[in-house]
Image (cartoon, grey):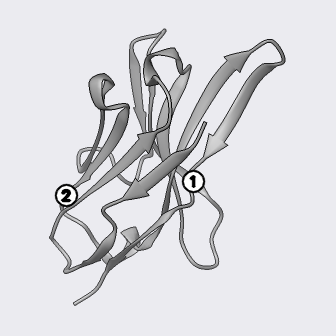
Amino acid sequence: VQLVESGGGLVQPGGSLRLSCVASRNITTFSVLGWYRQAPGKQRELVARIIPRLGTTDYGDSVKGRFTVSRDNARNTIYLDMDKLTVEDTAVYSCNVIISDRSGFRPYWGQGTQGTVSS
């Protein structure tokens, strides 16, 4: 499966961005759909994920209450709406899905999109 992200860019503190991740196949078959980010000099961290089978949505502690992950099955698209952005949110944001097949669970990653928060 291929994942293509878009929507990154430069925004001022307090602003908003919407990231999109379009998958090359039907996302209703995916076990997990979500977003990670990696800031310079830091480890990659979970931003948000949806686990459809459990009906749950998880967020990283630093983004709770500010970010919202969602999906549009008809468009095979996963969204990340980011509000009240701070400079600490500056990172490369990557779409991640986990798909179950005969071999088990396989992760797939998008190429990443840069989100920069700066005045």
Q: Nearer the viewer, residue 102 or 16?
A: 102
Task: Give amino acid for label 2.
Answer: Asp
Which one is in front, 58 or 72? 72
Q: Label for residue 83?
A: 2
> What is the quadrant of residue 83 in the picture?
bottom left
- The x, y position of residue 106, in whole percent, is 73, 29
Q: Which callout, 1 or 2, points at the residue further toward the start of the chain?
A: 1
The residue tagged 1 is: 45
Closest to the observer, 8 or 56: 8
Tell me where residue 74 appears, x and y as whole percent: 28, 24
Q: Position of residue 89 (x, y in %)?
A: 38, 68
Return the mark for residue 12: none
Q: In the rendered view, does 114 fall on the left or right side of 70?
A: right
Q: Secondary structure at mark 2?
A: loop
Amino acid type, label 1: Glu
Q: Is residue 26 above or below residue 59?
A: above
